Image (cartoon, rainbow, N blue to C red):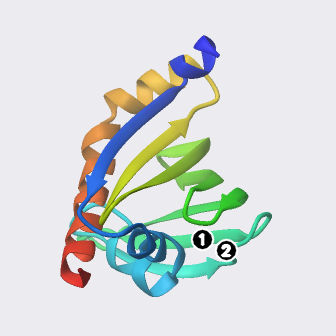
Amino acid sequence: MNERKDRTLTIERTFNAPIKLVWQAWTQPEHIAQWWGPKGMETKVIAHNFKEGGKWKYAMTMPDGNEFIAEGVYSEIVELKKIFSSADFKPMTEGVEVQALFEEKGEQTNFKFNVVHPTAEYCLQQEKMGFMNGWGSVFDRLEELLSAKV
């Protein structure tokens, strides 16, 4: 278990939105396109088969016109609780597992996001590349979307 901890980066947030709204933002393509990716990026949902074994694929376009692909396969989904998936964010990060965990807290939602890397070294490299800032920006966008819908 300790070895897994050395391979995992985690971000936790409390969103001022009910769990059903946060879940919809994570599971419906029209919402995902509005927040997935750091600020300044435009996201296009290419595939979104939201079921265990289903594939997802998003194209993200940077302000300079360069595009990169995020894709994976859902491995575990428990409604209003968790979404686990393989994930490749080409060309920057590949072969990771992303875990989105949701917990209802009245009209708020506690959210925990884990990215499990294949090795501790790769995890450290990703952290140094700006994992916290990059994903922090993504979740800032999610928070803005949720605030507009509450």
Residue 42 screen position, x and y as percent: 33, 76
| In this view, 96 is above or below 147 | above
Residue 124 screen position, x and y as percent: 43, 22
Label 2 element class: loop
Tell me the quarter of the picture where residue 126 sits: top left
How crowded is the residue under tag 2: few (<14 C-alpha within 10 Å), some, or many (20+)? some
Question: Which callout, 2 or 1, points to the residue nearer the camera?
Answer: 2
Tell me the quarter of the picture where residue 44 sits: bottom left
Tell me the quarter of the picture where residue 20 sits: bottom left
In the figure, is residue 142 to the left or right of 40?
right
| In this view, 107 is above or below 48 | above
Q: Circle 2 is placed at which residue position?
A: 50
How crowded is the residue under tag 1: few (<14 C-alpha within 10 Å), some, or many (20+)? some
Q: CA distance from mark 2 to mark 1?
A: 11 Å
The amino acid pointed to by label 1 is Lys
In the figure, is residue 51 to the left or right of 7?
right
The amino acid pointed to by label 2 is Phe
Q: Circle 1 is placed at which residue position?
A: 57
User: Which residue occupies the foreground of this view, 40 or 63?
Assistant: 40
